[in-house]
Image (cartoon, rainbow, N blue to C red):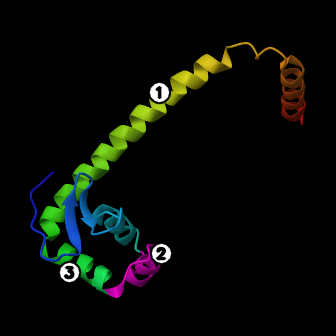
Amino acid sequence: MLETHTTTATLVRTERGLTLAGTRITLYDILTYLKADWPPQLIQHWLNLTAQQMSDVLAYITTYSETVEAEYQQVVQRAEENRRYWEERNQERLTRRAHEPPKPGLEAVYAKLQARKASRDRQ
């Protein structure tokens, strides 16, 4: 993570990055909503923030915009890498499970499900 300076007691650096003090809400969560064109009042309401917390966050983003944006891009990239990893891992697991026989005692349920799928595909 990039080194940043916190100017208020509202934002603290944790292992998750810049976080609103006393919450699990990161600056990056708020920045994601702002980039999606959510109005600050809606973000404040949605995340149950005080007006002071929201104004401190907006002031911090404005003051350190270049640093915040660079760190945000790192967070987004890491999240995308995690998403791809788990998507691939789950796909492998689902592929393996699709080729396994049904569990003992569920053969009738499995046959009924296959019949419904076949009926739906014919329509």
Q: Within 10 angstroms of label 2, few (less than 14), some, or many (20 or more) residues?
A: few
Q: From the viewer's perspective, is the residue at label 2 or at label 1 nearer?
A: 2
Give the residue at mark 1.
89
Q: Position of residue 27 (x, y in %)?
A: 28, 66
Mark 1, secondary structure of its residue: helix
Q: Residue at x 40, y 74 (%)?
A: 37
Left/right placement of residue 14 relative to residue 38 reads left
Nearer to me, 71 or 23: 23
Name the residue that disc number 2 marks: 46
State whether residue 49 is above or below residue 66.
below
Residue count near mark 3 (Cα–Cα under 10 Å), binned few <14, some 14–19, many ≥20 = some
Q: Amino acid at mark 1?
A: Arg
Q: Disc 3 marks which amino acid? A: Ala
Residue with the mark numbered 3: 59
Task: Bin the neighbour count of mark 1 within 10 Å (Cα to Cα): few under 14, some 14-19, many 20 and up.
Answer: few
Give the Cα distance between marks 2 and 3: 19 Å
